[in-house]
Image: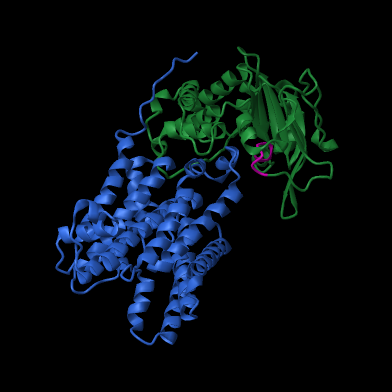
Chain colours: A green, B blue
Amino acid sequence: MTTHDTSVGPVETRISTGSTGSAGLDAARVSWSTSGRLILDGVDVTAPAGAVTGLLGPNGSGKSTLLRVLAGVQPPSGGDDDGARVGFAGTDLLALPRRRRARTLALVEQEAATDLPVTVLDAVLLGRIPHRSLLAGDSAEDRAAARRALEAVGATHLADREVTTLSGGERQRVHMARALAQEPALILLDEPTNHLDIAAQLDALRILRELADAGVTVLAALHDLQLAAQHCDHVVLLSGGRVVAAGDVNDVLVPDVLDPVYGVRTEVLTHPRTGRPVLTFARRD
Amino acid sequence: MVEPVDTPAPRRGAAWWLPASAVVLVATVLVTVTVGPADLSVADVWRSIATHVGLGGPLGLEPLGALPDGMVWELRLPRVLTAAAVGAGLAVCGVVMQSLTRNPLADPYLLGLSSGASLGAVLVLVAGLTVLLPVAAFGGAVAALAAALGLAGAIGTITPTRTVLAGLAVSQLAAAATSFVIFWSATGDSYREILSWLMGSVAGATWTSVAITGVAVLVLGTLLASTGSVLDAFTFGDTAAAALGVPVARVRWLLLVGVALLTGALVSQSGSIGFVGLILPHAVRLLTGARHRLLLPLSALCGASFLVWADTLARTVFAPREVPVGIVTAAIGAPVFALLLWRGRRIA
């Protein structure tokens, strides 16, 4: 697996999924523009099943937008005539009916807040909406799924609390549980560790790891390169709406790739125990 | 494998709230219809009603005299039933608008729909096109809603407070136009008529009013009240709703048009009664939490009882004078509005 210096242009390498694209996410030519400005410019992104893939990039590089387009909540636009394709397990997610898509993939937004007096259990039960008729109430199966989701994120004890009274870390777990209640095979997360203290960040990443181990395809936008180095299997690096590099953590998180994108000087050490890369940064001047 | 967990009902006693509030509503109608300045006993009132609904014969009741019978059957009962239908409808409209716009201050009155509907209604009444009344009121409500949301969007990000300010502008304009049209055309007591459109009143309710508001609430109100799951999906915003498979734009327009239709039908009979759609949903949420499946029907039933009692106060407290029911709802609703503004100050 190779990566490319940005000075020669935005060329990306694909993660080999070891199959013909039938496992995991395989999106191609994803573009999105607003008022004539191209925010995403023909992005190709793959995320293998059963692994945690980190979506990296500086502020404004298009991470959130890409997740929203992949999730189908924002239609792609402004690309070439070829058209975007968001393949997952052999189907085009963008061509699926909405409700079926919501049973396949779940999106955990960065700042999903509410002022309403909704309990944690009720918030998690929202994830069951795509699984039942719009006129039906919660079935026993819905409640069981919500309980399973709460247990998976370690939030069973919060079930009767109101969401507005939770800490940031607790709220993040509830949002993850809501996504899990959708029973998705693909989960997209926008900065799941933002505004969390370090213990809560590690909790969130542990949950992602457990999901991946259970066979779910996980794609998480992450701000923190250090966390990505410690916890992701693969990373996709965006800059200016294009993929700059993609592949194994050890191949992408290297000075040659990071320095031009972030405008810093990176040094990569090796963690003495895990053998994973540890990054340190300095200003370029 | 997770062991099956039996989950109790979401809140204690929740299963009883709907039947209990239905009983309260029926009791409210039966009691308030006996309250009034005329010297009618409770037994007389019920005798009149029983006779009209065909129970007089089987129960062996003597029919009431023509005058008291007319008082009950032609004046008081239509008034009480219209108040119930209008109260139920406005409360449902309030819930739907608050959820769709994620604005705790949304209500047909504050966003100008009611004033727009009043203007539409007055215009066709003056033109003598009474048959078009509900249609014109609907048109007025839609135009006002579009103007308020358009204006709120034009002055920046749509926040709850900006939306209310835009609604205020639209509502004042529509109210001024309504007043002007009545001044221009009315021959009799134009002040009273203006007041009943602007403040809202069910004093002139007839069986036609009952039919129009009742059918509107039963048809549109039931349709809106059945959208609980969809409205739930908006709890964490538009993106979250879309990610749960809800066609956000289509749902929003359909439901807002439904709200405008219902508001138009109600306002065409009652004028713009304020604050019912604002306070009832908030009060009921304190009981039920935010899930709409219970919130919507319970708000409807409580809104019906609330407006019937408010109207009973309006016609009895200062008897023999009568005040428009809108004064009573505003006296209760405006402080609640102030409280909501205070609580929501950080989202302004």
Quarter placement of the C terminus of chain B: bottom left
Of residues B23 and B196, the one nearer the viewer is: B23
Residue at x 33%, y 35% (from the top left corner): B15
- In the image, residue B337 sits, relative to residue B231, either above or below, namely below
Say whether residue B34 is visible. Answer: no
Task: Tell me if B55 is positioned left or right of A68 in this view.
Answer: left
Q: Residue A162 in the image: x percent, y percent?
A: 39, 36
Quadrant of the image occupied by residue B122: bottom left
Residue B29 in view here: yes
> Residue at left 62%, top 13%?
A272
Count of marks placed on residues: 0
Residue drawn at point x = 30 percent, y = 64 percent: B79
Tell me if A240 is positioned left or right of B292 in this view: right
| Residue B310 at x, y percent in the picture | 27, 61
* Residue A129 is a magenta residue: no
Above or below, A187 relative to B170: above
Q: Position of residue A153 (x, y in %)?
A: 49, 23
The image quarter in which residue A3 lies: top right
Query: Could you say which is closer to the camera, residue B188 or residue A237?
Result: B188
Q: Is residue B127 above or below residue A107?
A: below
Left or right of A44 on screen, residue A105: left
Q: Nearer the viewer, residue A270 or A151?
A: A151
Q: Does residue A69 show up magenta in the picture?
A: yes
- Residue B200's x, y, as percent? 35, 69
Magenta-colored span: A68-74
